[in-house]
Image: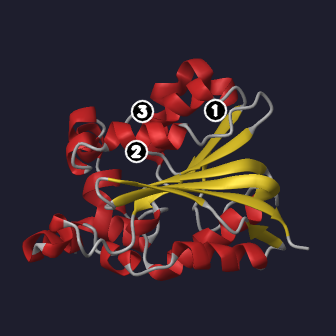
Amino acid sequence: MRFYRKFTRGVPDYLARYYWWAYLWPRGIWLFDHQTIINAILFGQYDKLLNKTLALVEAGTHARLLQLTCVYGKLTPSLLNVCAGQVHLCDVADGQLQLTRGKTRQDAARCPLARMNAECMGYVNDAFDQVIVFFLLHEMPASARVHTYAEIARVVRAGGSVLITEYASAPERHLLYRFAPFRWLFGSLEPFLPEFWQEDVVATLGEALLNNGKVMDENPHIEYVFAGFYRVMRFNISSRI
């Protein structure tokens, strides 16, 4: 019996198979939620990525935000600080939801948590003013990403926005990418990242929006970090005419 099977109950197979040690194992959850560890994984860029993300958040009093899956570190508390409205959060892993509740207990009324799979959420259509996705998509196989894009497009309202912070497209000029041992290491720890590097996020999300009667603005806001290794993208959404 493979060890990862101890963690398969109630979660997608790929999550248990490839990421049990990072998101499902209690000791892993404890370890990776240390800010020093998170910053090291992102090559010292965490605060810069976080600040650029927060600068693009819908902050109005009546805003309804959806943070798609829990995130290690201070993203959720920071969203609650900058947004006067509600920050909803869903994740498929109980341990991650428990960790997040511990960070948001004093704002629990504004931060509803739900156990859901990002590929098939229970929210009604057009429920949110903004959907925030912070380093999730590269950890999903292609089929799961397609379903997740479709769900994002379904639950975000026309007039709202989608905010994605992720790896950039294959950074072929970046030293970390050009150095073959690093590419091997990335592919070993993040088995779906090589494929995600080749994915056209704008086109794939755009198609999902069209299937839901919506479109994104022609010129999305895209900022690059760490010499083009990461990117922060905001897509403003409107109804299809």
The residue singled out by tag 3 in the image is: 74
Please tell me how crowded label 2 is: few (under 14), some (14-19), or many (20+) other residues with Cα within 10 Å: many
Residue at the far top: name it: 106
Q: Position of residue 150 (x, y in %)?
A: 67, 72
Q: Answer with mark 3 or mark 2, whichever residue precedes in sequence.
A: 2
- Specify the farthest residue to the right: 241
Mark 3 or 1: the one toward you:
3
211 with respect to 235 (left or right): right
Which secondary structure, mark 2? helix
Residue 26 location, quadrant? top left
Find disc 1 in the rendering and name its residue. 111
For the point 57% across and 61% down, the residue is 117
Q: Which mark is residue 57?
A: none
Quarter the N terminus occupies: bottom left
Within 10 Å of the Cα at label 1, are there few (<14), some (14-19), or many (20+) other Cα atoms?
many
Q: Is 213 left, or right, of 191 in this rendering?
A: right
The alpha-carbon separation of the residues under discs 3 and 1 comes to 14 Å
User: In this view of the protein, which residue sits in the foreground, 213 or 144?
Assistant: 213
- The amino acid type found where label 2 is placed reads Leu
Type of amino acid under label 3:
Lys
Q: Which residue is mark 2?
A: 49
Circle 3 SS class: loop
Would you say residue 9 is visible in this rendering?
yes
Residue 111 in picture, x, y percent from top left: 64, 32
Specify whether residue 5 is in view.
no
Choose top left, top right, bottom left or bottom right for residue 135. Answer: bottom left
